[in-house]
Image: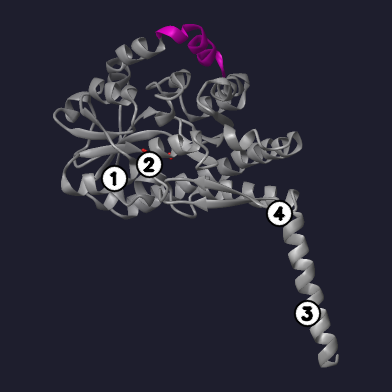
């Protein structure tokens, strides 16, 4: 190739690029997660973004902000409601104060075990709850569920009965339901953002917290004081990912359908990654010297009956249907 021809080719390529860019305006979807890069939920949402980008020839591009850099989940929900964040992956816990109907899944021991919870979110009740969120005044569109295993206690002592929690300040997620739950379990529930919990544990502002093994490990809470992981499994709360309704309403029906399809796939992909991560991080916690304690759940189940009565009264029919799911 002569020098002149190379120049022409370069100019043509540059022109093609510019035309390409102007022909397809790109919508950037800012996505938020409190978990670090590599966490199952983060990976599943990133992959959803890649599929959406490919299927729309780059009209959409998802930009993931992991590690809570956009704020705690309460703030992230607010930002998503006003359209400053487009996709929020959050626990259902902090959504309770915004969409009270979801609290039925946030109640202690409402699911028999994780398999029961999965059967419920995969079935008609799961779909109904997603629709309730979307149809609520919260200005959010519920895209899909994710797994979060079971939450158990991590403290400096082994907790086998409610008496073992006496006088202990335990960090819980921001929802009065969880403060009531922890108080009923024998401790003192203190709400704060996930990303503030590490220093609260380290400085003794709280004596312990409660979460699943992957979070206990990846948030480094296991290095901040707790020595025991007491398996009360008192909460089996699904995660959820939601879109700002402001963004959703600007999408074509076709693009909305694509997003819904990839959301369902993200839900399933996260589940496979999740199961592996629970096994991996449980092993890592044990290798780091954390003692896993078997707990008789009955005393905790009984102690939290008033919480289920208080928050569940208005959902009696729904709770019966949940219990009937096999
Ligand atoms: C983790 C959830 C995350 C919550 C966190 C918490 O994945 O969404 O923010 O717990 O305790 O299990 O705040």
Task: Identify the residue at image location x=35%, y=38%.
Answer: 211
Q: Are marks 2 and 1 in contact (CB under 8 Å)?
A: yes
Residue that badge 4 annotates: 58
Mark 1 or mark 4, which is nearer to you?
4
Cα distance between the residues tagged 1 and 4: 36 Å
Residue that badge 2 annotates: 72
Q: Quadrant of residue 250?
A: top right
Q: In the image, is 280 to the left or to the right of 49? A: left
Q: Is mark 3 within 8 Å of ligand 1?
A: no
- Is 66 rendered above or below residue 155? below
Residue that badge 1 annotates: 196
Q: Is mark 4 within 8 Å of ligand 1?
A: no
Judging depth in this view, the residue of 215 and 88 nearest the camera is 88
Task: Identify the residue at image location x=67%, y=41%.
Answer: 262
Judging depth in this view, the residue of 175 and 5 nearest the camera is 5
Q: Which of the marked residues, 1 or 3, is nearer the chain's N terminus?
A: 3
């Amino acid at each position: 190739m002569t020098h002149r021809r190379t120049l022409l080719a370069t100019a043509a390529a540059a022109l093609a690029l510019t035309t390409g860019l102007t022909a397809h305006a790109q919508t950037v979807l800012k996505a938020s997660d409190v978990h670090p890069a590599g966490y199952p939920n983060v990976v599943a949402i990133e992959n959803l973004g890649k599929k959406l980008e490919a299927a729309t020839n780059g009209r959409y591009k998802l930009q993931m902000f992991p590690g809570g850099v956009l704020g705690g989940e309460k703030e992230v929900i607010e930002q998503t409601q006003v359209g400053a964040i487009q996709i929020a992956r959050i626990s259902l816990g902090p959504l309770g104060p915004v969409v009270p109907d979801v609290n039925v899944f946030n109640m202690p021991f409402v699911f028999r075990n994780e398999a029961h919870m999965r059967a419920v979110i995969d079935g008609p009740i799961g779909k109904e709850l997603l629709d309730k969120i979307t149809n609520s005044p919260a200005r959010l569109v519920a895209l899909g569920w994710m797994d979060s295993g079971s939450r158990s206690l991590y403290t400096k002592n082994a907790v086998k009965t409610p008496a073992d929690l006496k006088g202990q300040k335990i960090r819980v997620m921001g929802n009065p339901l969880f403060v009531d739950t922890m108080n009923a379990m024998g401790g003192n529930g203190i709400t704060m953002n996930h990303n503030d919990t590490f220093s609260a544990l380290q400085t003794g502002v709280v004596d312990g917290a409660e979460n699943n093994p992957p979070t206990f490990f990846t948030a480094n809470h296991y290095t901040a004081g707790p020595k025991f992981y007491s398996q009360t499994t008192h909460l089996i709360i699904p995660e959820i990912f939601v879109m700002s309704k402001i963004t959703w309403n600007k999408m074509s029906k076709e693009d909305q359908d694509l997003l819904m399809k990839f959301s369902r796939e993200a839900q399933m992909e996260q589940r496979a990654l999740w199961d592996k991560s629970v096994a991996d991080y449980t092993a890592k916690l044990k290798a780091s010297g954390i003692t896993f304690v078997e707990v008789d759940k009955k005393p905790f189940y009984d102690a939290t009956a008033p919480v289920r009565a208080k928050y569940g009264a208005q959902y009696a029919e729904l709770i019966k249907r949940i219990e009937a799911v096999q």
